[in-house]
Image (tube, helix red, strand yellow):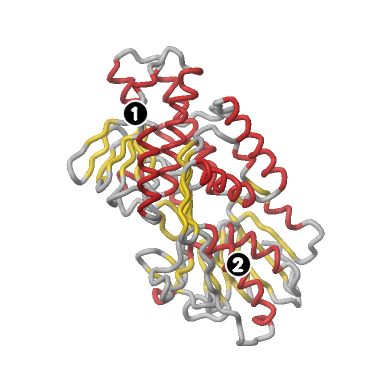
Amino acid sequence: MNIPKSDLPRVVVVGGGFAGLNLVKKLMKLPIQLVMLNKHNYHAFQPLLYQVSTSGIEPDSIVYPLRMFIKRQKNFYFRLAEVSKVDPEKKILTADIGELSYDYLIINTGTRTNFFGNDQIKKYAMPMKTIPQALNLRSLILQNFEKSTIVVPQEDKKFILNFVIVGAGPTGVELAGAIAEFKHSVLPLDFPDLDPELMQIHILEGADRVLPPMSIKSSKKAEKALKDLGVQIHTNTIVTDYDGHLVKTKDGKEFKTRTLIWSAGVTGNLIEGFPESSYNSRSNRYYVNEHNKVNGYDDVFALGDIALMKSEAYPNGHPQVAQPAIQQAKTLSDNFSKILKGKSNLKPFKYKDKGSMATIGRNKAVADIGKLQFSGFMAWLIWMFIHLMALVGFRNRLVVFLNWVYNYTNYNKASRLIIRRFSVRERRVRTNSEL
């Protein structure tokens, strides 16, 4: 990998997500050789991917170049690489660009879409976990509108304009709301020869309500907001099959659609090489202690979505969202000077739940913050402020804010561009790493 030898301890960070990004900012100040490996040369702000896929913002406004951290840093190296294997006994990791030894390894590889072993659904459904996937979905949505202007039979138009979203967590709910607003505000302007009523939006959820992780009050508010936008909600509904045309469910429901969007779950992005005692094979998350050390190792750490830290308050681990990753990165970075000196009096990680929220569209959102629940315009403002401040870089905050102001004042979306056409054949040949 062309990393120079050094007398300083080598700390390798795998992954450029929320944990990796916040970690390297502080580790740079320590007397170490710091190496970051990531399969993309940017950090992507995943909570706003749904806005990229629905033409609300452009992808370059929610990404931040990882090499920006190298400026004026002598002992920090970034390599564009995908790590495939680790030998924790020899302290060597293997990537697509070669091998690298380490003194300390910090893994924050995040998650990938979980299709629960259903290869048929995996082949035809549209995930939305990465920038390329969000752009693929945006292209397909816009291509559906273009194609529906050409076909004549009403049934064919309904098939093309039927959107089915699997999973009613925050991503599914936000995506359903954004597509519904597209139907009401954009479709009549851009496609006056199409009847908007031909467009249908279905959201399918295996639990008995939308937003299962949130409070019942917020769930009911979100459901009402979605229904007001014309979204059809199907709870207690588990998808069993999809062949690119027909969605089948466990209770016998069927939906004809060209577009099935999968937001029903995630699974950890494990790196091969660790014994089974080090990870949970069901969730694919590494078992870690209160210092984020991977089970069985003092020199390997895991942070964020990939880490499974059990406690009395969180018997199944912390939620796989940004805040645990950010807070774990801070605790580990605070501890690392002690780790380098071999000290054992490390600060244990304690998660501070800052709440959860979801937006359903214009002036509509729900938020659970502590014991308080907000909905409507106030929750929408809270959601916008928190997401805006969480973006990396002043430019990104400014661009996203201006986009939101434009979209709000003009009832319009400015990014309705098919940059690259997306084909069904491309959907079939996606690799596991892309999913």
Q: Residue at x 28, y 39 (%)?
A: 242
What residue did someone put label 1 on? 200
* Residue 431: % across, % down: 44, 47
* Residue 13: % across, % down: 62, 65
Residue toward you, 204 or 384: 384
**What amino acid is at disc 1?**
Gln
**What amino acid is at disc 2?**
Ala
Residue 184 vertical placement versus 175 (above, below): above
Residue toward you, 256 or 382: 382
Separation of disc 1 and disc 2 at Cα? 42 Å
Label 1 secondary element = strand
Label placed on residue 329: 2
* Residue 281: % across, % down: 36, 67
Q: Quadrant of residue 162?
A: top left
Q: Residues within 10 Å of mark 1 (few under 14, many from 20)?
A: many
Q: Residue at x 36, y 25 (%)?
A: 199
Q: Residue furthest right?
A: 72
Q: Residues within 10 Å of mark 2 (few under 14, many from 20)?
A: many
Locate residue 388 relative to residue 135 in the image: left or right.
right
Q: Residue at x 58, y 44 (%)?
A: 384
Residue toward you, 244 or 149: 149
Q: Are marks 1 and 2 in contact (CB under 8 Å)?
A: no
Residue 86 vertical placement versus 64 (above, below): below
